[in-house]
Amino acid sequence: MRRLIFCLLLLAGGINNAYSQVKTILLDARDRIVADSALAINYAVFGKVEGDTVYTFKKFDFDGVLLTSGTFKDDSLQVPHGQFVYYDWITPDNNYTNLGYEINGKARYVVLTGRYINGLRFGKWLSFYADGKVKQMANYSQGKLNGLYQSYDNNGKVQISGVYVSDKKNGPWILRGGKQEDEYADDKLISSLTGKKLRDKQAERKNVN
């Protein structure tokens, strides 16, 4: 652990020329700052570039592998503000390309991206499969789901699609790749169609259009 702390100090010192303030902190399993190294499972380096208004943040595991990057408004890291990128390992469980630990020579991938405004999720958030294809797309406003939500299979086909209004499902939701359609009003399920009834409704829409 002494060697680790020494390496962290070297890392902080190495980037001190670019940042006016640099800190290295230890994080527990819930990303809380801890002083006891026995409770830490990750560490982070953060600092504010001269003239900038946010703190650039990078979280690593103890092997030095980048886990998360983003920016915060405060040095206590309580208010995320700006773009965040989250990373994960490629494994046979999430690799639908070759069941190996690498894709195109890479062992890691971007698993989630999105933006915070004053601590709340804002705009489009995307999660990804290990090969880079979009897995889920959701839109946020003031930290709440607002707008189109879609979920895709690993071939890129939409499996679930619908609209949220203030965290609540509203209107038609397409499920099971188009084999089911549920109708919601203020997050309450009004109706659910499958089979012939759904095909009849879809045919009726085509005739109207």
Image (cartoon, rainbow, N blue to C red):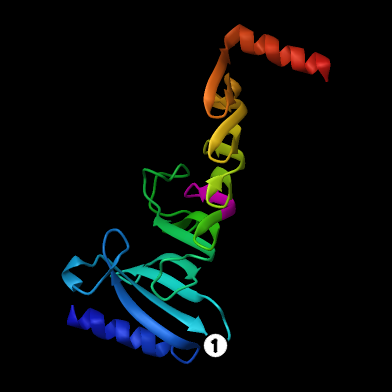
Q: Amino acid at mark 1?
A: Glu
Q: Around disc 1, counting alpha carbons within 10 Å, would you say few (fewer than 14), some (14 to 19), or many (20 or more)?
A: few
Look at mark 1 in the image and give the residue it sits on: 50
Rendering quarter of residue 65: bottom left
Front residue of 129/179: it is: 179
- Say which residue appears at 25% left-offset and 85% top-offset: 6
Q: Secondary structure at mark 1?
A: loop
Is residue 189 something that shows in the picture? Answer: yes
Q: Is residue 125 magenta?
A: yes
Rendering quarter of residue 116: bottom right
Front residue of 165/38: it is: 165
| 196 sits left or right of 1 in the view | right
Q: Position of residue 11 (x, y in %)?
A: 36, 84
Q: Tell me where the magenta segment starts and ends, as one range.
A: 122-133
Above or below residue 168? Residue 26 is: below
Q: Is residue 107 magenta?
A: no
